[in-house]
Image: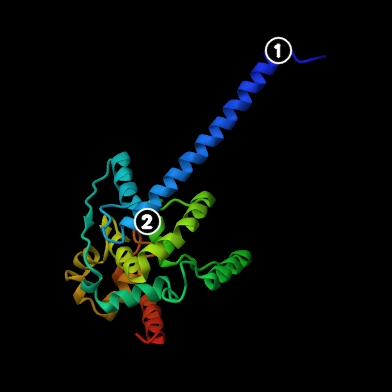
Amino acid sequence: MTATPDTDTKTTLRTGFLRSFIRWLVIGVVLLWSLAALILVAARWIDPPTTAVHIQRRLQAWIHHTPYRERYNFIPLSQISADLQHAVIAAEDANFYRHHGFDWHQIEIAAGDDLEGARTRGASTITQQLVKNLFFGTGRSILRKGVEATLVPVAEFVLGKRRILEIYLNVVEWGPGIYGAESACRYYDETAARNIGRQQAARLAAILPAPLKRRPERMNNYSAIILRRMGQMGW
């Protein structure tokens, strides 16, 4: 039984549509990636007015009809106490100044813990977390991780360590509607970020893994661990 002309035509149309769809999908992905890369280049000089996490929280509050007040005040790194900078690095990415965006040693440890069912901490670097905050929000997926991995080297190359740390400390979520070191210090300790000492800094850094659930005053054990790490790192 031979195929009819109508069948051949429909097959050709379907094939042509699929090819066109794939082509435009690839073009769309490339354009979005290019836009994200350009935003990272601009972020070398321009402070981000918002992030994907900020937008996500606003949308969640609107959908659930819950009150939402955003506290976000971008300040230079020089106005954030060295103790707070060191505490966050010790807590979130101890090898920050030694890697190029990915901490392969921590990734290996986390992978081993996953296999043993004993995962206790993530392996994402500050650079990875910054890219996620800026472009992807708090969702998790293999696709997001894949795209994130391609943007991390761009961030490392165009921003450098100092600017990465400055942006991260200013945009990271530190509580409900609380973003950045200055807002967190004003909210929790009623002082400017430049005035935060070691103990306060360790408590603030301790809530970063779960900022919507944790409070600094309850972080005695973890803040003590962070303080020990700071000491071990010469801080």
Quadrant into which the N terminus falls: top right
Circle 2: is it few (<14), some (14-19), or many (20+) Cα within 10 Å? many
Residue beneath the point at 31% across and 47% down: 55
Using a 10 Å C-alpha cutoff, classify the residue at mark 1 as few (fewer than 14 neighbours), some (14 to 19) or many (20 or more).
few
User: Height in image: 171 above or below 199?
Assistant: above
Q: Position of residue 62 (x, y in %)?
A: 28, 41
CA–CA distance in space, label 2 to label 1: 53 Å
Within the image, what quadrant is residue 43 found in? bottom left
Left or right of 209, for residue 103: right
Give 25 or 117, whichever is nearer the viewer.
25
Q: Where on the picture, by quarter, is residue 213?
A: bottom left
> Residue at (24%, 79%) from the top-left corner?
197
Q: Position of residue 105 (x, y in %)?
A: 55, 73
Indicate the amino acid at tag 2.
Answer: Asn
Nearer mark to the viewer, of 2 and 1: 1
Q: Are marks 2 and 1 in contact (CB under 8 Å)?
A: no
Give the percent coordinates (x, y) of residue 31. 43, 43
Query: What colour scheme has been applied to the protein in the rendered image?
Result: rainbow
Q: How many marks?
A: 2
Residue type, numbered disc 1: Pro
Disc assigned to residue 5: 1
Q: Is residue 122 above or below residue 38?
A: below
Whether residue 218 can be seen here = no
- SS under mark 2: helix
User: Can you identify the residue that label 2 sits on?
Assistant: 133
